[in-house]
Amino acid sequence: MRLDRRDFLRLSALGGGTLALGPAFWQAAYAAPAEPGPGPYGAMSGSADANGLRLPAGFSSRVVARSGRVVAGTSYTWHSAPDGGACFPMNGGGWAYVSNSETSSGGASAIRFDGGGAIVGAYRILSGTRTNCAGGPTPWGTWLSCEEHGSGRVWECDPTKSSQGVARGALGTFAHEAVAVDPDDGRLYLTEDTSSGRLYRFTPSAWPVLTAGTLEAAKVTGDPMAGTATLTWVVCAATSPASEQSSVASKTTVFSGGEGCWYDSGVVYFTTKSNNRVWAHTPATGKLEVIYDASLYSGSPLTGVDNVVVSRSKDIYVAEDGGNMEICIITPGTPRTVSPFLRLEGHSSSELCGPAFSPDGRRLYFSSQRGTTGSSSGGYTFEVTGPFR
């Protein structure tokens, strides 16, 4: 997984959001939590399309993979319980969509697309793990796959070809959910999906190598709802959850049910399902804010907050674990609004996972983990195409 400087810069430009707006913009844009309001694409259609999706006008969908079935145009059988995912630009054009498998046999797979969006390959990139939930892409073009169990680790994978990931034990041993890489500050941020979970950050000893470094857990000072909160950090061991380290647990803050995590334009976004909140942390200032809280407004559309991704237009897309199976958008403005973007019907016993945009921002990928059957063997992976701003 060696990468030269030219490739690092290219992948950084293609794989993440532009830094042009910077953290000051977001501190102004998210001065108060989002409230229900109209979305940028108008209302969803009144009825579902052939794939069960209700979408705004001008958008369409296709199924690109189903668990237990061969991916069209390939000889590869798609994994069960598709979960967290991300897209990666490929040398020579096109991209790959990577997806975890949240099963006892775990692992991760990838679907490769050409420049026109046609499927040209599918393959395994991680085996020999279990309960791979979410994760995150790196600016140097690898996928960090997170195991969600008590002795879970983070595995670094090559999404470009059939391969085998490498365990990165320095990133901690706990029920990992997601990870976001901050290339400006040279750190990684990680969520933990337990009732006693913490928010962690990892500072590599030699950026961007993940074999060694310092792991810390967060402590909140102030009121994040009032915009007065900041984070400080307490060093912890990488061999067990922070909640089980007596010298750390009492000095750090519980983020119960940590879920999705994404870095964009100087801000780390993450979600906690225990209280249906979306958070924003600005590493440059230490500031922590709540930018969405479902309890603030009656009939708030976003519940069961889970995986999160930021689009090129700086809208925050949040997938739901349960509820009415929507992906919702939090849009900056005055006021800030939250609205449904899509709804998947007929999958009521499932959850939506792995939202990710193609490198050109024109296609959104995501999965229904348990599909229409409610079984991990019934998963679907979708693509939505349309006039994304």
Image (cartoon, rainbow, N blue to C red):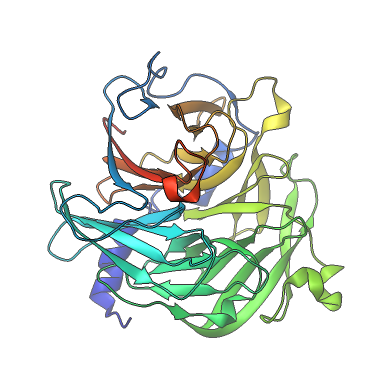
- Residue 213 x/y as whole percent: 57, 83
Quadrant, the C terminus = top left
Residue depicted at x 26% and y 30%: 387
Left or right of 47 in this view: 317: right
Image location of residue 17, percent across then percent down: 38, 52
Q: For this rendering, which residue is in front, 308 or 331?
A: 308
At horizontal 74% and vertical 40% (from top left) the residue drawn is: 225
Tell me if 217 is positioned left or right of 187 in this view.
Answer: right
Tell me, yes or no, if residue 268 can be seen here: no
Q: Total label count?
A: 0
Nearest to the observer: residue 146 or residue 50: 50
Indicate the position of residue 199 as horizontal and vertical percent values.
67, 61
Task: Report the quarter where the N terminus lies.
Answer: bottom left
Looking at the image, residue 193 lies above or below residue 342? below
User: Which picture quadrant has residue 160?
Assistant: bottom left
Q: Residue at x 60, y 63 (%)?
A: 148
Residue 264 image point, x, y percent? 46, 53
Whether residue 238 can be seen here = yes
Query: Would you identify the image quadrant in which residue 258 lies?
Result: bottom right
The residue that appears at 72% across and 41% down in the rendered structure is 275
